[in-house]
Amino acid sequence: MENKDIQEQYGERAIEDTKEAFASAARIPVDAVKATIQVEKDGLGLVHQAAHVATEVAPLRQVKRFWYGLGPGLTTGAADDDPSGIATYSQTGAKYGFSLLWLAAFTFPLMAVVQEMCARIGMQTGRGLAYNIRKFFPRWVLITVAVLVLIANSFNIGADLGALAKAVQLLAPTANYSLIVVSFTALCLLMEIFISYEKYARYLKYLAMILSVYIITAFVIRDFPWIQVARSAFTPSFEGMDKEKIILICGIFGTTISPYLFFWQTSQEVEEKIEEGKTLAQIAREEVPQTEVNKMRVDVWVGMLFSNLAMFFIIAVCAATLFSNGITNINSASDAAAALKPLAGEYASLLFALGIFGVGLLGVPVLAGSTSYVISETFGWKEGLHKKFSQAKAFYGVIIFSMLIGLIMNFVGLDPIKALIYSAIANGLVAPVILVLIVLLSSKKHVMGARTNHPVTTAIGWIAASVMIIVAAATIYSLF
């Protein structure tokens, strides 16, 4: 009986081998004439399809699948390089040349690990960061954090709106500053409030790609010092640590490891789940599949890498052009764009200005949205960009309020550079506190279930918190 079964198996295998041999023989003529002959038979049709996918469609599909896999991580990383951040990086390159270029590589893993923890908290709990802080820590801690984030973000929004207007004036010198600021404020509010989350998230995602202009700028500058850039990229320099340099370093850390990014990343992961049709209860109850965690990590690390690459090239471009020609006093991102024109050419200046314009349209709504997530979750209000205005009036009211505060700042004579300094100091003070809370939350099993931190992740989180504490303390010390 067993021998008969074996014979039948061998017989079936022989038939299959024969079929495969015929199919292999058929591939030759099919591949040769597939562009002109319509293949109807199923077997040969599959061969044609496989050949087509292997030679043309597969790479495109892989790129398309990779692009669609990116989301909150990419937009959060791009929003980190808002006009205020660009101004900080431009000042760094113009004032100190290549000496602080290494900070781009140093902050990258710290930034990526922190944002990954934030994303994981949102995916696992189904709630934003402020909600989890309110649930597991004393209320006064969250209220203190919320007030500082509101102050820092308001200063940041004001500086970004001003930078947007200046960038437009570089492209259209006769444009009215006041009209530009008011128009952009209205545009950002209309898009954030009245466009559906699905469309709005797609808009933010495509807008994030504007950061690539800062990488391109380096390639349009003649005789760009690539060897010096490569040498400075990973070589720490601590020479000439005066008061001004310490404050600027604090600004760099404050704009790369920023509190508003923590809250935005966490809440956007929740928004993505809701967009998939899940309720908050379902998100909190279901175990997050490892495939989704892996997808999120790719998204976050790609987003943070993209952000830090832009930071790297902004510093490098300003160091290679402005610093090298003795132009060290840059007060805004638009100043840097204008100063580049006679040194690096019209194209470099134009790309720089377009970048400010694009990231401003991305960064301002993210700043206002993160402020609203914090305030709304602090007081238990209905929140979320997936909700309509009538469903979350308080949430959208906070967005409007923070945008109006930023708008007013442009008409009361507040120095934009002072606004940046105040924002950086506020971020520097509140970031260490929030980082400690993030590491604690993402390490607790009763909060994260099976998705608690890996020991290495926790260690890097504590390093990030320690670095921010040192930077904040040094900044406070240098001010007195």
Image (cartoon, grey):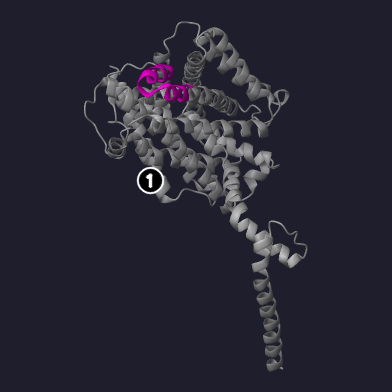
- Crowd class of label 1 (few under 14; some 14 to 19; many from 20; radius 10 Å): few
- Residue 72 as seen in the image, left or right of residue 232: right
Q: Which amino acid does label 1 sit on?
A: Ala
466 falls in the magenta region: no
Q: In this view, does 455 lie above or below 174?
A: below
Q: In this view, does 398 lie above or below 100?
A: above
Q: Quadrant location of the C terminus?
A: top left
Instruction: Tell me where residue 242 appears, x and y as whole percent.
Output: 24, 22
Report the predominant secondary structure element of the magenta stretch.
helix
Between residue 67 and residue 219, name the one nearer to us. 219
Task: Please tell me in which quadrant of the rendered image residue 330 appears.
Answer: top left
The single residue placed furthest to the left in the displayed view is 239
The single residue placed furthest to the top in the displayed view is 412
Can residue 261 be seen?
Answer: no
341 falls in the magenta region: yes
Magenta region: which residues?
A: 332-353
State how many labels appear: 1
Between residue 206 and residue 44, name the one nearer to us. 44
Between residue 378 and residue 51, name the one nearer to us. 51
Q: Is residue 377 above or below residue 289?
A: above
The single residue placed furthest to the right in the displayed view is 40
Can residue 467 be seen?
Answer: yes
Instruction: Tell me where residue 283 appears, x and y as whole percent.
Output: 64, 44
Q: Quadrant location of the N terminus?
A: bottom right
Instruction: Tell me where residue 394 appears, x and y as whole percent.
Output: 65, 21
Between residue 463 and residue 164, name the one nearer to us. 164
Q: Which type of secondary structure does the marked residue at label 1 adopt?
A: helix
Question: What residue does disc 1 label?
Answer: 459
- Residue 380 as seen in the image, left or right of residue 424: right
Instruction: Tell me where residue 216 appears, x and y as whole percent.
Output: 44, 33
